[in-house]
Image (cartoon, rainbow, N blue to C red):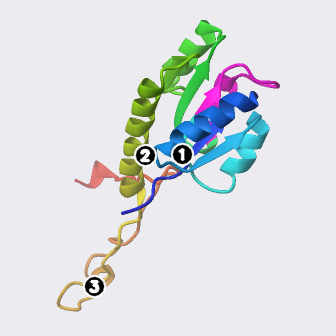
Amino acid sequence: MKKPYPILIVDDEPNIRSSLGRLFHREGYETLLAETATDALDILETGPVSVVLTDYLMPGQSGVEFLRVVKKRYPQAIRIVLSGKADMESIMAGVREGVVSHFLLKPWDNNVLKEIIRKAVVEMEKKQGFLEKPVLLKTRPDGENLAQVYPGILDVNEATNGAIIIDDSQF
């Protein structure tokens, strides 16, 4: 079984970052901590994460603005905003756009947050399995070359997000 991708925690308050890091570490998750959106994007460049949990109010840009970038570059990550002070109109716009999957107010309830993260990681694990490249058989069991028998059968038209595009006009 694959190990889940880490949880990225982004908050400019060191006590919040360390508190959330400890909470999820005790739950068995690997956590990555970032103070700013810029730091978080640098971390995201190093490899995939299951969840991005970010504060709303940060220096430089809001959590929703940051998650717009995350969604564009790393659409597989589940995106959550955690904040004590937020512009609810901006948050709701983020939810409507599919940028924010969950929004929680500080102070948070550890049990609620742990359950949301658990479900998000399960969702991400399903995506990991689904997005793995399938093994394409190039020959039939009798050894006959499929490409010779069925020209074009091995050509795969793939979208940038990994989905296979099927041209159903030929059916």
Q: Can residue 71 be seen in this view?
A: no
Tell me, yes or no, whether the two marked residues, 3 and 1, touch with CB atoms within 8 Å. Answer: no
Q: Which of marks 1 and 2 is nearer the N terminus?
A: 1
Tag 1: Cα neighbours inside 10 Å, few (<14), some, or many (≥20)?
A: few
Question: Residue 94 appears at what percent x and percent y?
Answer: 57, 20
Tell me, yes or no, whether the two marked residues, 3 and 2, touch with CB atoms within 8 Å. Answer: no
Badge 2 marks a residue whose secondary structure is: helix
- Which amino acid type is shown beneath numbered disc 1? His
Tag 3: Cα neighbours inside 10 Å, few (<14), some, or many (≥20)?
A: few
Q: Does the magenta stretch include residue 54?
A: yes
CA separation, marks 3 and 1? 47 Å
Q: Earlier in the sequence, mark 3 or mark 2?
A: 2
CA separation, marks 1 and 2? 18 Å
Is 3 on the left-hand or right-hand side of 23? left
Q: Name the residue under label 1.
A: 25
Is 170 on the left-hand or right-hand side of 93? left
Q: Nearer the viewer, residue 66 or 51?
A: 51
Q: Which of 100 and 11 is in front in this view?
A: 11
Q: Is residue 104 magenta?
A: no
- Provide the residue span drawn in magenta: 53-72
Residue at horizontal 39%, vertical 52%?
165
- Picture quadrant of residue 141: bottom left
* Residue 124: numbered disc: 2
- Which amino acid type is shown beneath numbered disc 3? Thr
- Above or below, 71 against 45 in this view is above
Badge 3 marks a residue whose secondary structure is: loop
Residue at horizontal 36%, vertical 67%?
134
Q: Residue furthest bottom?
A: 143
Badge 1 marks a residue whose secondary structure is: helix
Q: Which of 12 and 151 is in front in this view?
A: 12
Question: Residue 157 appears at what percent x and percent y?
Answer: 44, 59
